[in-house]
Image (cartoon, coloured by chain):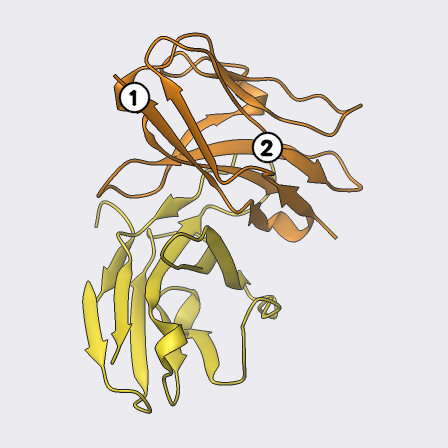
Chain colours: A orange, B yellow
């Protein structure tokens, strides 16, 4: 079975503070991991994928197979980062499994 | 079309009535998902279609929920005898399928309100 766990529902930080959104996964194979974001009144959309090893809007995420984690990080949060963030795993039968999501609130 | 399209955008129905929600995926995408997003909750997986394989229905909350995908394209999610707890935003997503960098593209959702 494949599972994605996002242990926190809400993270509130001040502008300029560092952000870490936690994601842990359970999967017996080699995972493909993603972060999706949903801004207010917008569609859910891909933020980044671990294979690309890219930084998008200042966010990065490193796959740690030993800890089965894929935490999303940004050194200095901006107000426009306020959104709901979902971690996702592409596993068996190409099925995409999402975590429950976390709301990030960045205060001025 | 340019993206995943869902209809209707909003649906208000009376408790006990049946509803049908429609999803038009991106052309050529073999994978199609239905999720439910309730107020204050995250994404709840409902059902997954992949090509001609039998759908993964493991997320359907009760036998009042069913979905079909005709011709490998359009999908319809049907909720029979709706209950107030069915009120939520129902999201559809499609992806090219297969392994590798497979991005899922989401529709704008159908907001269902059961009164």
Q: Is residue B100 left or right of residue B93?
A: right
Q: In percent of the image, x 23 and y 82: which residue is there?
A: B13
The residue pinned by badge 2 equals: A33
Residue A39 versus residue B42 in the image, above or below:
above
**Residue B70 appears at what percent x and percent y?**
40, 73
**Residue A104 appears at what percent x and percent y?**
40, 30
Chain on which label 2 sits: A
The residue pinned by badge 1 equals: A107
Labels 2 and 1 positioned on one and the same chain: yes
Chain on which label 1 sits: A
Residue in the foreground of this view, choosing between A85 and A52: A85
Q: Which mark is residue A6?
A: none
Circle 2 Cα neighbour tier, 10 Å, few/some/many (<14 / 14–19 / ≥20)? many
- Viewer-nearest of labels 2 and 1? 1
Q: Is residue A103 left or right of residue B107?
A: right
Label 2: element kind: strand
Residue A91 versus residue A21 in the image, above or below:
below
Would residue A91 be seen by someone viewing this image from the given angle? no
**Residue A92 appears at what percent x and percent y?**
69, 49
Q: In percent of the image, x 26 and y 52: which residue is there?
A: B108
Asked if labels 1 and 2 touch by Cβ distance under 8 angstroms, the answer is no
Instruction: Give the mark, 2 or 1, whose residue is nearer the N terminus.
Output: 2
Exactly how many numbered labels are in the figure?
A: 2
Residue in the foreground of this view, choosing between A33 and A3: A3
Residue in the foreground of this view, choosing between B51 and B44: B44
Residue A85 versus residue A67 in the image, above or below:
below
Q: In percent of the image, x 29 and y 21: which residue is there?
A: A107
Residue A13 versus residue B80 in the image, above or below:
above
């Amino acid at each position: 079975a494949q599972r994605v766990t996002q242990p926190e529902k809400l993270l509130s930080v001040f502008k300029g503070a560092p952000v870490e959104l936690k994601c842990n996964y359970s999967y017996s194979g080699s995972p493909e991991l993603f972060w999706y974001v949903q801004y207010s009144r917008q569609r859910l959309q891909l933020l980044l994928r671990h294979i690309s090893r890219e930084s998008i809007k200042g966010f990065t995420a490193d796959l740690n197979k030993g800890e089965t984690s894929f935490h999303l990080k940004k050194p200095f949060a901006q107000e426009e980062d306020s959104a709901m963030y979902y971690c996702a795993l592409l596993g068996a039968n190409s099925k995409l499994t999402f975590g429950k999501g976390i709301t990030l609130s960045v205060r001025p | 079309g340019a993206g995943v399209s869902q209809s209707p955008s909003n649906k208000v129905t009376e408790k006990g009535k049946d509803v049908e929600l429609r999803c038009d995926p991106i052309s050529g995408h073999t994978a199609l998902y239905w999720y439910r997003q309730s107020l204050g909750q995250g994404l709840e997986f409902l059902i997954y279609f992949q090509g001609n394989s039998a759908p993964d229905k493991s997320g359907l909350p009760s036998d009042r929920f069913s979905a079909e995908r005709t011709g490998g394209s359009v999908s319809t999610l049907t909720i029979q005898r709706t209950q107030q707890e069915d009120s939520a935003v129902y999201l559809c997503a499609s992806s090219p399928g297969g392994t590798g960098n497979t991005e899922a593209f989401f529709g704008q959702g159908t907001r269902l309100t059961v009164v």
